[in-house]
Image (spheres, rainbow, N blue to C red):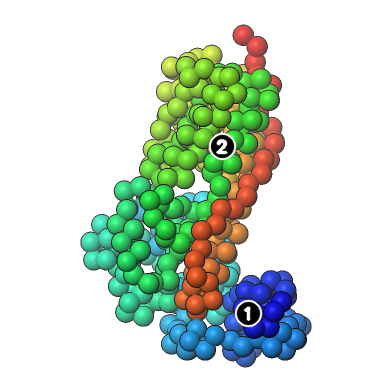
Amino acid sequence: MNSERTTIKDIARECGVSLSTVSLVLNDNPRISEKTRQKVQEAVRRHSYQPNQQARGLASKSSSIMSVVVPNLKHVFSDAYFGEILSGIHAEASEAGYKILLDVANERFAKNQDYINIIRSRRADGMLFIAASVNEAYLCELEEYNLPFVLVNHYYPTSRLNYIAIDYTASARIAADHLISLGHRRIGLIAGTNTYTGLDFRDSFLSHCRQNGLADGDVLWEDGGKSWNQEGGYESARRLLERRPDLTAIMAGNDRMAVGAISYVTNRGLRVPQDVSVMGVDDIQAAAFTSPALTTIRHDLYEVGRRSFQRVLGIFREEVEACHELMPVSLLERESTGPAKQS
C-alpha cells in the first residue's frame, strides 16, 4: 500500500477485520481484544496511516444509534427472512458499540418524512431500509440529500441510492438451470412483483427458460402476493396446478412460499418430488427441516445485514463514498427436487 493514499478500508482489508473494528481501535475502545488491537496498530504504524480528521470529527458527534426500517407487513418482526437480516445488523452494531432504533415504514413514517428527519435531528447516525417495495419510491428523494443511507437487499433501478442486495438475476438463472437439467419442461413460477429484486427474479427466470427452449405456455407465473409468505405460496400453487395439472416443477421466489407450495401439492395427493419438484430461495433455517428437505438457492441474509451496517457506518464516518453491491449466491440441492415425471 502507498502510505500517502492508505485508507481505513486498506487497513481493515489487510488485517482481516471490519471497518468498524479499525475505527474502534483508533478510538481506543476497550471492547476490542488485545490481539486484534495489536494487529491493527502494527498495520497503522507500518503504513503511517493518518485518520481522516473530518470523519473523526463526525464520529465524535455520533449518537451511537443506527436506524433500521422494515416494511409495513403483518408480523414482520417474527419473519425468518427479516430476522436473519436484523441478526446480522445487530451483531455488527454491537461490535461497533451501536444500538439499533427499529421503525416500520407505515403511512405516517412516509408522510412525516421520518426517513429524513431521524438523521437530520441526530437521533441516529444513519439509516438502513430493508426490502422496500416498488411503491415506496419516495425514498428516491434521498438522492437530493447527503445523508448516510443504505437500502438493504433491494434497490431502485432509476436511482443511485446506496444499496447492498443479493444477485436475484443470478439466483433465477441457477434455479432455472437446475430444474431444466432434471428434465422439467412444464414449470410453475411463484414470485412477488412488489419489489425490484422480485421483478428481477421473475423476469430472469422466465427469460432463461425461454432461452433454453421452453415454450411460453409451459412456464406459468403466479404472483405470490406482497407478503411472500406460506399462504401466498399455497394459493399460488393451487392456481398453477388448476391451470396446468401436468406441471412437474414449481419454483418459488423464496423458501416461505416454497413451504406453502409443498403443503398444497401434498394436500392434493401428489408426491414431492416424484410427481412435482418444489424449489425455493434464501435457505432460511427451516428449509433443511421441511419434509422433504427443501432444495433452494442460498442467500446469506445474515451477511447482507452485517455488511449493510458496515457500509452505512462507513458512509457516516466518510470512509465510504458509495455502495452499490450485489452478493453472490449458490445452489443447495436437497430432497424436494428430482427428475421430471414422464408423461
Residue carrying label 2 = 172
Q: How many marks?
A: 2
Q: Position of residue 250 (x, y in %)?
A: 54, 27
Residue drawn at (69%, 36%), measured in percent from left and top? Answer: 333
Report the amino acid beneath label 1: Arg
Amino acid residing under circle 2 = Ala
Where residue 53 is drawn, which disc sits there?
none
Rendered image quadrant of residue 93: bottom right
For the residue carrying disc 2, how many other residues have a C-alpha within 10 Å: few (<14), some (14-19), or many (20+)? Answer: many
Nearer to the camera, 229 or 43: 43
Give the residue drawn at x 54%, y 76%: 319
Q: Secondary structure at mark 2?
A: helix
Apparent side of residue 36 relative to residue 284 in the rendered image (left or right): right
> Contact (CB < 8 A) between labels 1 and 2?
no
Q: Is residue 48 above or below residue 114?
A: below
| Percent of width and height locating residue 205 | 53, 32
Q: Quadrant of the C terminus?
A: top right
Looking at the image, the residue that sits furthest to the top is: 343
Q: Nearer the viewer, residue 315 or 30?
A: 315
From this view, report whether residue 320 is shown above or below residue 57.
above
Q: Which residue is nearer to you in this view: 287 or 150?
A: 150
Q: Quadrant of the N terminus?
A: bottom right
The correct choice, above or below, for 54 with respect to 219 in the image is below
